[in-house]
Image (spheres, rainbow, N blue to C red):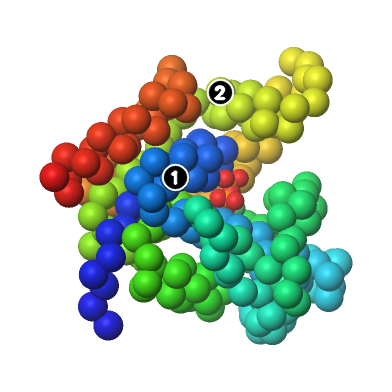
Amino acid sequence: MTRRRYVIAIDGPAASGKSSTAQMVAEKLGYLHVDSGSLYRAATAAMLRTEPDATRWTEHGVLAAARPVELRAARTSFYPVLDGRAIEDEIRGGVVTRNVSRVAQMPRVREWVNDRVREAAEANDVVVDGRDMGTVVFPDADLKIFLVADSRERAARRLRQRGTPTSEQMLDDETIRINERDARDARQTVPAADAVIIDTTGLSQQEQVEQIVSLSKQRSG
Ligand code: CDP
């Protein structure tokens, strides 16, 4: 099928601000936000309910567990539901975050996520975020952005997002966790040749959103 809708692909490593930026860009432009990572997380959460011991997971098992996961459209974004229920808190928890990269290495799980994301983009203009949106899923996206930021800065943002008091030790630990996840996800986290790379280390959220919105207006202009 030929895609006629507008697609903005925002990729980047762990905690680079992709999802919150994508959500704000979508709201400014009146598009819908699709967070591909939420599907990897939903498949992981579904699998954990069936088999808590991740060393026993198989690709076949994960695909079966993920079958009841659907993406539903809300006003400005899609969100995953499992057995008819929203699972936002469950998919953002530490157990899912520690195990999601294992699931993301499974090629048929990647196809399952990619199909769901492409379906969401069939009938809507979308801002999609993830790691391989501009390379694998939408190689013909209208605008491709790759966000990068220093890993300690990303760790600090993640901790601020949680809103709980933090110490230097917590910042060190979170930086290590982010570096580990970057290493596990390195293979699929590569900018497209035609992506605009934005280093957000010294930028505010507002500034990065504005840069992307103005690039999008130039392209469609
Ligand atoms: O924003 P954050 O890096 O915490 O993660 P996310 O976007 O919610 O993605 C969670 C995990 O899903 C990542 O660590 C990757 O293992 C995987 N993922 C992927 O492999 N490809 C994507 N397009 C999106 C997520």
| Residue, disc 1 | 27
Q: Is residue 100 visible?
A: yes
Where, quadrant-wise, is the N terminus in this rendering? bottom left
Q: Is residue 151 above or below residue 43?
A: above
100 relative to 184 in the view: left or right = right
- Mark 1, residues whose alpha carbon is within 10 Å: few (<14), some, or many (≥20)? some
Which of the 4 image quadrants contains residue 86?
bottom right
Tag 1's secondary structure?
helix
Q: Is residue 119 above or below residue 192?
A: below
Which of the 4 image quadrants contains residue 103?
bottom right
Tag of residue 153: 2
Whole-percent x, y for residue 197 in the image: 31, 36
Question: Which sits in the foreground, 20 or 113?
Answer: 20
Q: Tell me the residue at 42%/47% (across/down).
A: 26
Whole-percent x, y for residue 131 in the image: 45, 52
Whole-percent x, y for residue 185 in the image: 53, 52
Where, quadrant-wise, is the C terminus in this rendering? top left
